[in-house]
Image (spheres, coloured by chain):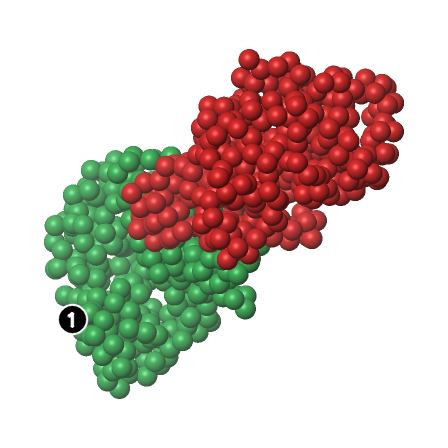
Chain colours: A green, B red
Amino acid sequence: MAKDNYYGLILAGGRGTRFWPRSRRRKAKQVLNVIGDSTLIQATAGRLSPLIPPERLWVLTNRHLRAEIVRQLPRIPAAQILAEPEQRNTAPAIGLAAHILRSIDKDAVMGVFPSDHVISRPARYLRLLRPAFRAAAQGRIVVLGIQPRFAETGFGYVEFPKEVQPGSLTPYPVVRFREKPSLETARQYVDAGNFFWNAGMFFWRADVLLDALRRHLPRTATLLASLPAFGDKRFSSRLKRVFPLCENISVDYAVMERAGNVAGLACDEIGWNDVGSWDAVRALLPADADGNVTRSEALLAASRGNYVDAGDKLVALLGVENLIVVDTPDALLIADRARAQEVGGLVKALEKKQRWDLL
Amino acid sequence: MAKDNYYGLILAGGRGTRFWPRSRRRKAKQVLNVIGDSTLIQATAGRLSPLIPPERLWVLTNRHLRAEIVRQLPRIPAAQILAEPEQRNTAPAIGLAAHILRSIDKDAVMGVFPSDHVISRPARYLRLLRPAFRAAAQGRIVVLGIQPRFAETGFGYVEFPKEVQPGSLTPYPVVRFREKPSLETARQYVDAGNFFWNAGMFFWRADVLLDALRRHLPRTATLLASLPAFGDKRFSSRLKRVFPLCENISVDYAVMERAGNVAGLACDEIGWNDVGSWDAVRALLPADADGNVTRSEALLAASRGNYVDAGDKLVALLGVENLIVVDTPDALLIADRARAQEVGGLVKALEKKQRWDLL
């Protein structure tokens, strides 16, 4: 039975520029139905619901996305969907949420969840969330590690004890957090078997996190402590002044790597995927015999390994391979699959040109 | 000084399916601005105007295209823009026009002009049209030969005498018409120097052409002779019955190859191009340093040799090469440039699926 002092914080401030031209300032990756019928943030809230009902879910996002998220998550009280006054990294955002939750419920235990990941086996995932919350309720700082499927260099790793059993419901003492490794190091991690991906899923009591911030990030902690209670009418104006002064730092660097005595749950195959690019989407969806994934009507001739997403439009491919094709009413992307990670660079180029109409 | 018995017949019944998705049944290649600001048929009428004013230009097209052509060529009397009741090849179409012109002007001399070719040096071209018309007025059947730029196997060739001087204003006796050759033969033709491309530009008196049809295509000649005069109110209904019974054959096979004593004008560089595919369009337009030709706004990253035509839409290319990209509101084509000739096959596939909305 879930406890009524378990809260979920969904972090939804990211831009997901690698999903341009579908992703825009007001339509970031987390509010797109990148996979399947619901959007990523809807799926995130949905899979948590057996443990954390919507009335105990909170969302932190930015001013461009808030209205869309309120629309997409009607069961979460709109007051719990907050826009950060300015983009900061995860430490101030999580600190803010902890401050609010602590003022609402002095026993609040919070889980932090990215809003834009896929988990294809939610039941297996939930099994591990319960001991994570339990350990957090006992005062521990907890991280969920994802069993690595390959030598990814884009994630941080969590080093578990050598005897770790993926899928075990017992928390392990975390040996160390490891920053994004070189390819060679990543390979050693995967071979070793006791290094897990850090997917940004953390659990702690709100007061424990605030204590940790006071110790490791005192400036931000002091600023947050200066905020009035959440219901106070001065809260919003005060937040606008205080939040931009907080340090721009991730909770990983600010807290996790510095805290001793972190507990870790080691996931086995929960089907986690951070869906980092259009090519990752392609890999997650069923393909035809020639490796083409088509999310809209397509006419394919001598074409292989393509991803096509063009709404109501028919797309005809003739003699092309390994292309990402994403069409929207005002912008069309055609990219080599191998460069799907570089789509964010196109967005930067558009920002430089001040093409806000396309951003 | 042009003679007032010189008439122009513009053949505009083709579909130009290789220009899909821009070309449709009601928007065939000849009514598109494939190159530059005017459409191909507008450019055709325009370049003839110093020799043949609009009131002596006639157009043969089909029922899908007639309204658009009437709209695009407002200076040509609408009654002179005719829709063939059914698609036939060039022999019946030209025979029909000769029948009409002969009934209007017994001394009519007609030049036949495809509607969908480009001629970048119209003044040089016009210089050769005058002797072509003059020789036709004297009772000759005349063909204009285009100096070949490479060993094209998609055209027929006209064999001139060995002493031919390209650009000469004197008509030569044509030695022979040659059908589309093999690559090896085409190379020999180009090396020989006295073989010219047959671009479908012919000149004759209307009565001479009708005589030739009587001799070489008697069934069609008899059917056309049964039509009432052009102004007669029964003309249209009678044509609907008669035209479909005519032979489906080109004037090249039916007349040119069988007629003796054909005269030929040999063009030098008039900048003729039949613009046979999107890749031909690409070759005709200015490219950037990486060989990209963009007819709409484009954001190019690590991309080379592409052709982009997407109306008002921004197209972002990332790491792609040698693509034809043509976007329309309901269909998007992405083709390897080397397969630009095969675009017509996509149209056939859509016909098979009865996707008239896209045709």
Instruction: Give the percent coordinates (x, y) of residue B23.
Output: 58, 39
Instruction: Give the percent coordinates (x, y) of residue A112.
Output: 32, 60
Q: How many marks?
A: 1
Instruction: Give the percent coordinates (x, y) of residue B196.
Output: 52, 42
Which sits in the foreground, A179 or A284?
Answer: A284
Q: Report the amino acid beneath label 1.
A: Gly
Instruction: Give the percent coordinates (x, y) of residue A301.
Output: 55, 58
Q: Residue at x 31, y 46 (%)?
A: B290
Which sits in the foreground, A333 or B113?
Answer: B113
Q: Residue at x 61, y 33 (%)?
A: B263
Q: Secondary structure at mark 1?
A: loop
Q: Chain of mark 1?
A: A
Q: Is residue A193 left or right of residue A259?
A: right
- For the N terminus of chain A, the image quarter is bottom left
Q: Is residue B131 at least partly visible in the picture?
A: yes
Which sits in the foreground, A342 or B327?
Answer: B327
Which sits in the foreground, A47 or B120?
Answer: B120
Q: Residue furthest front?
A: B163
Q: Residue at x 38, y 65 (%)?
A: A273
- Displayed quadrant of residue A171: bottom left
- Displayed quadrant of residue A83: top left
On the image, numbered disc 1 is attached to which residue?
A: A260
Q: Residue at x 29, y 43 (%)?
A: B289
- For the C terminus of chain A, the image quarter is top left
The correct choice, above or below, for A189 with respect to B359 in the image is: below
